[in-house]
Image (cartoon, grey):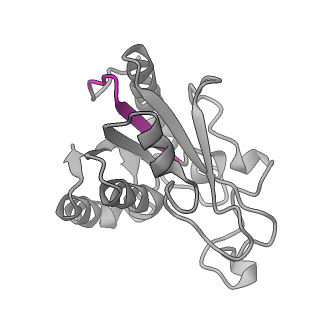
């Protein structure tokens, strides 16, 4: 089993971004290396739970005919359609029943990249006493980046677990790290 990167405590939130079948190898919008992240993310989930931290898992949860799909004029192939295998979390991801699941991109006419986009997540986390957010998942250069920036903008000290986040375009990795650092997110290599 992998060892966790982070040390968690009460008031911490582990936010696992979009670890869904469609974003892992074999999926409609696969990110190379997505599957390989699962053991490390599971170690983080276990460490967070044992420390009493909240575990949140975001997911794309698109309706059929979503505006982001290429057949609707959007930039992406059809992916993460509600109630399909592709939209399900990776089967080896260790999410328990008490994991807070956040669905985004649920409106036909609006896309959402961040777990904070029209979800009420920031207010919910403040209400639960969240003090710090630790982020990992897919994809670094799309939803992870947007989520980390929104976490910082919402006033949460935010850390990105870089080794547990892969990019659609691996050449964007360094740029994303620099952008997030400039935005106030701590990037942990």
Q: Please provide percent x and percent y for residue 140.
A: 39, 56
Task: Say which quadrant the N terminus sits in.
Answer: top left
Q: Nearer the viewer, residue 121 or 126?
A: 126
14 magenta-colored: yes
Residue 50 in sight here: yes
Residue 140 in sight here: no
User: On the rendered structure, is 76 left or right of 189?
Assistant: right
Quadrant position of residue 159:
top left
Q: Please provide percent x and percent y for residue 115.
A: 51, 54
- Residue at 30% x, 48% y is 156
Q: Residue furthest bottom?
A: 73
Q: Please provide percent x and percent y for residue 73.
A: 69, 85
Q: Nearer the viewer, residue 181 or 2?
A: 181
- Residue at 20% x, 63% y is 178
Q: Residue furthest front?
A: 127
Residue 167 versus residue 65 in the image, above or below: above
95 magenta-colored: no
User: On the rendered structure, is 69 left or right of 184?
Assistant: right
Q: Please provide percent x and percent y for residue 107.
A: 71, 67
User: On the rendered structure, is 188 left or right of 171?
Assistant: left
Quadrant position of residue 154:
bottom left
Span shown in magenta: 7-17
Quadrant position of residue 40:
top left
């Amino acid at each position: 089993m992998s060892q966790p990167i982070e040390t968690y405590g009460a008031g911490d939130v582990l936010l696992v971004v979009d670890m869904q079948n469609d974003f892992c190898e074999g999926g409609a919008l696969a990110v190379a290396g997505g599957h390989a992240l699962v053991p490390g993310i599971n170690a983080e989930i276990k460490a967070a739970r044992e420390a009493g931290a909240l575990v949140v898992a975001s997911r794309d949860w698109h309706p059929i005919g979503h505006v982001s799909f290429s057949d609707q004029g959007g930039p992406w192939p059809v992916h993460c359609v509600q109630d399909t295998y592709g939209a399900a979390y990776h089967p080896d991801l260790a999410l328990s029943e008490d994991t807070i699941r956040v669905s985004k991109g649920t409106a036909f006419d609006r896309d959402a990249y961040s777990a904070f986009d029209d979800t009420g997540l920031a207010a919910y986390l403040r209400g639960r006493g969240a003090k710090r957010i630790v982020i990992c998942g897919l994809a670094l250069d799309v939803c992870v980046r947007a989520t980390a920036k929104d976490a910082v903008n919402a006033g949460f000290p935010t850390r990105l677990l870089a080794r547990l986040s892969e990019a659609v375009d691996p050449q964007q990795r360094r740029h994303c790290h620099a952008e997030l650092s400039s935005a106030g997110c701590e990037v942990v290599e």
